Amino acid sequence: MNQIDNINILIVDDRPENLLVLESVLENMNCNIVKALAGNQALSLLLDYDFALVLLDVQMPDMDGFETAELMRSSARTRYIPVIFVTAISKEQKCIFKGYEVGAVDYLFKPIEPVILQSKVRVFIDLYNQKKIVEEQSELLKLKVEELLELREANSRLENLSICDALTGISNRRHFDKYLETTYKSRRRSGKPLSLIMADIDYFKRYNDNYGHIKGDESIIEVAKAMASSVRRPTDLVTRYGGEEFAIVLAETDKDGAITVAEKVRKKINELALRNEYSNVAPYITISLGVATILPSDDCSIEDFINRADKALYKAKESGRNNTISYEE
């Protein structure tokens, strides 16, 4: 598309002398005048330039002004360009109505009164300028919105990186510590029970030593997925606590409920049947789980709570592994 510095106005008339008259009237209007001698030529120019206004003669051979305006309205690119008919034909209403039907915004009758023409053209130049300002502001606003969305997405990614385990995609130890503290305080106020499950993959060192760390990572990912799919409440949290150890925070869950969840997780891991011929428990990967349940109070701190679940996990390992043990005073 041709780029014109000034605002473009198209004047269309089959008589060159009429074009010269119009051009001379508009020469001091700070606009770029583009001329066409026929409707077809005008339609072609409309594809090359961005016009603020079209001054269109009605009576032209081959294609008159009405036909030209109708074709303009049929194109998405040109349908909203203002058209003023410049004509010497009758001022009868039927002729005027015909022009408005095909999209004209105004009529000027020959001979042209320069002051009237300049006044009307100035209105459309101002409208065009305002339109361009609005479009620029809209584009700036769009860019700002896109920047804000990108920034929010970047912040979201950073937040996810800060709370998610890089290997498994579930919560990491940092998120666990913060979430457990918040949940502990909330349940202390409500007087509702809070449960914690600590879980450990059985004989995982042997698995890593014999199958390699890549296979080890793959198995940790599968175990994490199985655990996450077994704990569905939005108030619960599944965490990779460290290495092959996992933790599950169960809000408003009593001892029996926590044991039920732990057993569900354990059986889900067994169903994966991830081969581990170096385990003394089973020929596939298994986990041991320790459960602790408290009513948060001064009698049991968060550290004590975690220690209770750890002790229960230790007993589960001592008891043959691939089982669930609940902490008892």
Image (spheres, rainbow, N blue to C red):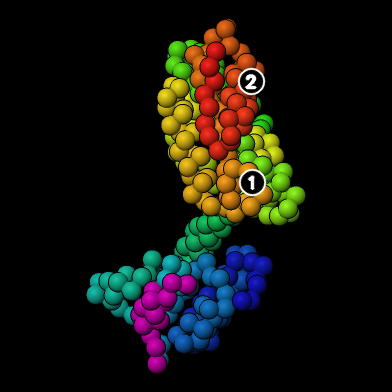
Residue shown at the point (52%, 57%) measured from the top left: 131
Residue 103 location (% of width, % of height): 36, 70
Q: CA distance from mark 2 to mark 1?
A: 26 Å
Res 95 → quadrant: bottom left
In magenta segment, residue 76: yes
Would residue 158 appear left or right of 37 to someone viewing this image? right
Q: Quadrant of the N terminus?
A: bottom right
Would residue 106 appear left or right of 158 to someone viewing this image? left
As drawn, the label of residue 181 is none
Location of residue 94 with respect to 63 vertically, above or below: above
Which of label 2 and label 1 is nearer to you?
1
- Residue type highlighted by circle 2: Asn
Q: Which of the two labelled residues, at mark 2 and mark 1, occupies the earlier sequence position?
A: 1
> Magenta residues?
62-77
Q: What residue is shown with label 2?
A: 307
Q: What residue is shown with label 1?
A: 279
Nearer to us in this view, 149 or 71: 149
Residue shown at the point (45%, 12%) measured from the top left: 191
Nearer to us in this view, 240 or 137: 240
- Residue type highlighted by circle 1: Ser
Res 125 → quadrant: bottom right
